[in-house]
Amino acid sequence: MTQMPPFTLLSPRIDEDAVVRSEPAPTAAQDAPIVLLLHGLGSHEHDLAGLVPHLPEDFRYVSLRGIHAYGPGYAWFEMPIDPQRPEAIDPAAAAVETWIAAQSEPVVGAIGFSQGGLLALHLLRRDARALDFVVNLSGVPFPAPLPGDAALAAARPPVLWGHGGRDPLFGGEIEEMTREFLSTHTQLEEERRPELGHAVDEVELRALAAFLRRRAGSSPHPGTEL
């Protein structure tokens, strides 16, 4: 069994010097709302930023770096996840919440891959009104009940879940657990790619863009009308 690299907490706050902000499109309003990009385990803030050219121009996209160093990249929280310790996710969630609170533009959504997907969902489980919507790409919810779950089930924000049928991190039981949780706590849209592994393909990317266009059309924030 391969030993995992150590996790080293760099700071309890988001590193502002590492934030990657997309340039607003010429047609976008100056106060266009922000959608966060939250990378996966061992990756970095430039990873999901590569999706931005394929996404609607109704939003500004801001990619954040995880608060832990992990190998050559970064992580949001230590792995493996212990279902008895939801507090292990809280420092990353608090760091993102603090960053959101400091922004002058509204932060309306988050796109997370793998570990970043869990974190995006965790933000909603801590506060069901924290974000208008979430995109969870190849991620799972924290595998135990949390105090905010009832409020989340009442609010039922839109969530797009994209994942592959050949993802080695998703056995049948984990996939069904994720589907059950999301379908009972959110307005779930699922894009399952039977032959895809732990990755994002063009079909998922098109589904993501369409999901965001629908969110822009229903957003209460200014500057996002189609």
Image (tube, rainbow, N blue to C red):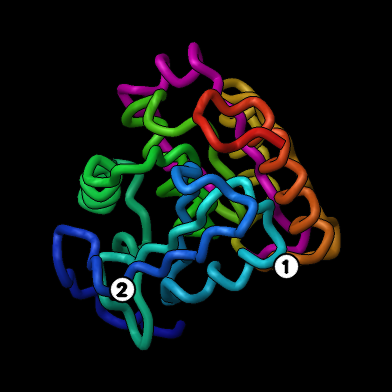
Q: Look at the picture and state if 56 lies above or below 87.
A: below
* Residue at 47%, 37% in the rendered image: 108
Q: Which residue is disc 2 drawn over?
A: 18
Query: Would you say 214 lies left or right of 131 here?
Result: right
- Quadrant of res 2: bottom left
How packed is label 1: few (under 14 Cα within 10 Å), some, or many (20 or more)?
Answer: some
- Residue 68 in view here: yes
Q: Position of residue 145 (x, y in %)?
A: 39, 28
Q: Look at the picture and state if 159 lies above or below 13.
A: above
* Residue at 25%, 73% in the rendered image: 17
* Disc on res. 89: none
* Residue at 41%, 22% in the rendered image: 149
Rounded to the nearest angstrom, the CA distance separating label 2 from label 1 is 29 Å
Q: Look at the picture and state if 3 lies above or below 8.
A: below
Quadrant, the C terminus: top right
Query: Would you say 193 lies left or right of 80 here?
Result: right
Helix, strand or loop at label 2? It is: helix
Whether pointer 2 and pointer 1 mark residues with C-beta atoms closer than 8 Å, the reply is no
Image depth: mark 2 or mark 1 in front: 2
Three-letter amino acid code at the position of disc 1:
Gly
Front residue of 225 and 36: 225
State the residue lying farthest toward the bottom. 72
- Quadrant of res 13: bottom left
How packed is label 2: few (under 14 Cα within 10 Å), some, or many (20 or more)?
Answer: some
Query: Would you say 216 lies left or right of 30 here?
Result: right
Q: Position of residue 161 (x, y in %)?
A: 66, 44
Helix, strand or loop at label 1? It is: loop
Q: Which residues are magenta?
A: 140-168
Three-letter amino acid code at the position of disc 2:
Ala
- Residue 177 in view here: no
Q: Which residue is disc 1 drawn over?
A: 197
Front residue of 69 and 172: 69
